[in-house]
Image (cartoon, rainbow, N blue to C red):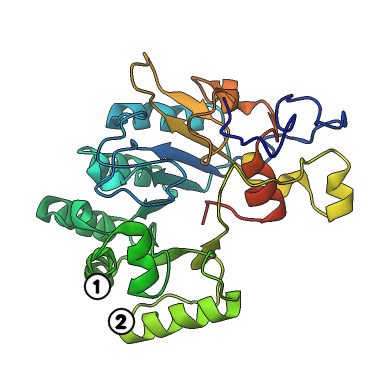
């Protein structure tokens, strides 16, 4: 069931038709360039507005194993997907005890690997740091960490992630900087400032810390819109592509899929979207072949985040 409030009666209920009876937009998997792995929803912190509700207690998505990852990497080759990137997200990926083995398996395919992390204590354990350093040495230029820095100031960042979180993340980023690991940043646009003001703030932070990250580049400093399924947003019809001057190929589900393992499930599942891990409507099967079917844009996130917001989780 979708987490929708009473302000949007009849919306996002029928995968074929909108509340007004118009044909709902669908997106085909036309360019599968990113395969995501959600390593599990457990996290070392609980953020105020985490879209996936990660926390030290949330194990609705349990840990993937390195064997799971290797299986889907083999399927990637069998299906001949032109994937250029393998992504790892959570929860906090470095909570998973097999994360270094998973990253090495992904890097062994020759593809770029992107890890979404808060760069806090799980990443800073000695064994993990040694593993990251070895991977970065063995696969130069192939490994990128996208660090969650909700705001360039400690005040706003800590309001989301807890007192002292900003300082701990910067400690992790300092280590990554000194280890020569490529970093980008993911921030949020919920602070009442313009995009220019936000990017200027990040630029100051990077300059102060010596981080080789471009605050003006939206690929290096990604600013995500708020994802609140209770906010009333328009449904996307087939006519919207022409009205908005957009192509279905620009939407994230045209280019990516995500593998998860649900608690109690016999096998992992493949989802259409990284943002909708709990909605059964967006579960496409257990194999990449099954996941090649198209996706109905039948959720508020499809409209606000992907089509209207133009955001993407990939690098």
Residue positioned most to the left? 126
Q: Is residue 255 above or below residue 206?
A: above
Q: From where the camera sits, is residue 289 visible?
A: no
Point out which mark residue 174 bears: 1
In the image shown, does 46 or 221 lie closer to the viewer? 46
Q: Reading the chain from its start, which is encountered first: label 2 or label 1?
A: 1
Residue 100: percent from the left, percent from the top?
24, 45
Q: Is residue 33 above or below residue 191?
A: above
Characterize the local packing of mark 1: few (<14), some (14-19) or many (20 or more) Cα atoms within 10 angstroms.
some
Identify the element where label 2 is drawn.
Answer: helix
Residue 301: percent from the left, percent from the top?
62, 43
The residues tagged by marks 2 and 1 sit, at their Cα atoms, a distance apart of 7 Å
Identify the element where label 1 is drawn.
Answer: helix
Residue positioned most to the front? 6
In the image shown, does 241 or 103 lie closer to the viewer? 241
**Residue 263 shown left or right of residue 49 in the figure:** left
Residue 31: percent from the left, percent from the top?
65, 42
What quarter of the picture does the N terminus occupy?
top right
Residue positioned most to the top? 266
User: What residue lies at 23% left-to-right and 55% top-to-bottom?
Assistant: 132
Q: Is residue 219 above or below residue 123?
A: below
User: What residue lies at 83% left-to-right and 38% top-to-bottom?
Assistant: 237
**Residue 158 shown left or right of residue 242 in the figure:** left
User: What residue lies at 22% left-to-right and 69% top-to-bottom?
Assistant: 171
Residue 200: percent from the left, percent from the top?
50, 83
In the image shown, does 64 or 44 lie closer to the viewer? 44
Characterize the local packing of mark 2: few (<14), some (14-19) or many (20 or more) Cα atoms within 10 angstroms.
few
Residue highlighted by disc 2: 209
User: What residue lies at 40% left-to-right and 41% top-to-bottom?
Assistant: 53
Q: Is residue 13 above or below residue 99?
A: above
């Amino acid at each position: 069931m979708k987490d929708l409030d009473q302000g949007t009666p009849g919306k996002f209920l029928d995968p074929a038709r909108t509340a007004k009876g118009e044909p709902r937009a669908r997106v085909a998997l036309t360019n599968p360039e990113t395969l995501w792995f959600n390593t599990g929803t457990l996290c070392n912190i609980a953020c105020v507005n985490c879209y996936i509700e990660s926390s030290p207690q949330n194990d609705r998505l349990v840990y993937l194993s390195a064997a799971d990852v290797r299986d889907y990497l083999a399927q990637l080759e069998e299906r001949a997907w032109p994937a250029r990137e393998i992504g790892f997200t959570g929860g906090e990926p470095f909570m998973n005890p097999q994360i270094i083995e998973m990253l090495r398996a992904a890097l062994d395919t020759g593809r770029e690997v992107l890890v979404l992390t808060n760069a806090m204590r799980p990443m800073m354990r000695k064994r993990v740091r040694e593993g990251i350093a070895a991977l970065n040495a063995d696969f130069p230029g192939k490994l990128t960490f996208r660090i969650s820095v909700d705001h360039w100031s400690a005040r706003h960042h800590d309001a989301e992630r807890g007192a002292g979180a900003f300082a701990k993340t910067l400690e992790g980023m300092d280590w990554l900087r000194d280890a020569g690991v490529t970093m980008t940043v993911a921030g949020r646009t919920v602070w009442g400032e313009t995009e220019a003001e936000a990017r200027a703030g990040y630029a100051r932070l990077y300059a102060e810390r010596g981080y080789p990250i471009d605050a003006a580049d939206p690929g290096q400093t990604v600013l995500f819109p708020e994802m609140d399924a209770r906010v009333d947003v328009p449904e996307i019809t087939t006519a919207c592509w022409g009205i908005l001057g957009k192509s279905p190929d620009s939407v994230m589900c045209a280019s990516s899929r995500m593998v998860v393992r649900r608690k109690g499930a016999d096998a992992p599942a493949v989802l259409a979207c990284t943002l909708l891990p709990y909605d059964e409507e967006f579960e496409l099967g257990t194999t990449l072949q099954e996941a090649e079917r198209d996706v109905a844009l039948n959720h508020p996130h499809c409209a606000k985040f992907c089509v209207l917001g133009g955001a993407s989780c990939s690098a």
